Image (cartoon, rainbow, N blue to C red):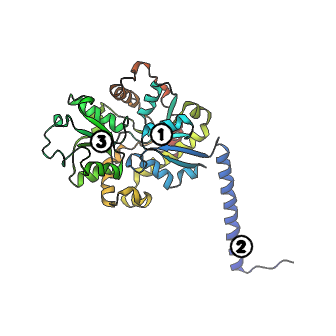
Amino acid sequence: MFTTLDPLSRRRFALVAACTVAGVAGLAASAVAQGRLEKSRLVMAVAGKPSLYYLPLTLAHQLGYFKAQGLDVEWLDVPDDARAAQALAAGTADLVAGPFENTLMLQSKGQAVRAFVLSGRAPQIAFGVSLRTLPHFSGMQDLRGKTIGVAGLGSSCHLLANLVLAGARIKPSDVSFTSVGIGSDALAALRTGQIDALANTDPAMTMLEQKGDVRIVADTRSLRGSQQLYGGLMPAACLYGTSEFVQKQPGVCQALAHAMVHSLKWLQTAGPSDIIKAVPEAYMLGDRAMYLAAFNKVREAFALDGLMPEDGPRHALAAVAGFDASVVASKIDLGKAFTNEYALKAKARFKA
């Protein structure tokens, strides 16, 4: 027996039916997308995810771009970039979010790794001298015999600090380096007088700068500052995995590149309120205005489309070879350190 529906009921029925069809279609589309993935659950190692250095990564997670690609990403928080690389080598992480120069250092040690999407085109690191322990700082020579804090020994911050000191003809043996992490740990180390200078990322450096705790003497938070120090564009944050992973799991790499380039595209037009809504409150060190000021300082340092700039690897290799004597530039194959294959497809898809 059939019952005739009144006009209102017919409209309700049509709406429910349409939603049901849309839901089924959505599930089907998701299933198709996931069918192209070699695996959907991933462990990503990262050191210092709350820093602005990894903002595109944070946004890809917070805005649901990884999930939209059928990916379930688990974060493995590690103290420094060296531990991230160790996790990759041990198989406890599928891939790493880290500085591009790490791929070169690892290659020099016989480890085959490859970057496949770039999220930073400048290191976003500032070098500041403590006005607490060196209130009368007059030049870099005042740092001889002093303690310099870096995010981690062997990190990008350590590399930059060495480069700045070398420019003043100060040898690494003329100072002491110590690992202080990022964020609140780095702030505490400088404010309590444990260190005399600090090379670190934002938002910590902007907070110290605003409060009058440091005097900035070198700055790669802008493209100009980075180019002056490194002689050109210095590729920074990227996603990398073992060469085997990148070769055998192209579906996963493409999905990751899609998510990251989508995030970079979003950043190009994001306003202050968008950033505040998307970023976890804990990442802002208790000061939203300061966080936004820091974001404005580093905004141009983010990549636009996930692509590795043509001369970027060469500048990175020069910096790494100058920092680590065990890295012989002539023995590094830059072509094996990265691929633009996945970023190119993501750029076309999102018109980045």
- Whichever of callouts 3 and 2 sits on the residue coming sooner in the sequence is 2
Name the residue rendered at 40%, 53% in the picture. Answer: 269
Label pair 3/1, CB-CB below 8 angstroms: no
Q: Mark 2 vs mark 1: give the one in front.
A: 1
Q: Quadrant of the N terminus?
A: bottom right
Closest to the observer, 206 or 46? 46
Name the residue rendered at 34%, 53% in the picture. Answer: 184
In the image, which disc is placed on residue 84? Answer: 1
**Mark 3 packing: few (<14 Cα in 10 Å), some, or many (20+)?**
many
Res 82 quadrant in image: top left
In percent of width and height, residue 169 lies at: 21, 28
In percent of width and height, residue 291 lies at: 33, 56
Closest to the observer, 83 or 48? 83
Can you say whether 282 is above or below 198 in the image?
Answer: below
In percent of width and height, residue 217 lies at: 21, 41
- Three-letter code, disc 2: Phe
Instruction: Pick out the residue farthest to the bottom.
Output: 6
- Three-letter code, disc 1: Ala
- Three-letter code, disc 3: Gly
To which residue does mark 3 refer? Answer: 149
Can you say whether 226 is above or below 190 in the image?
Answer: above
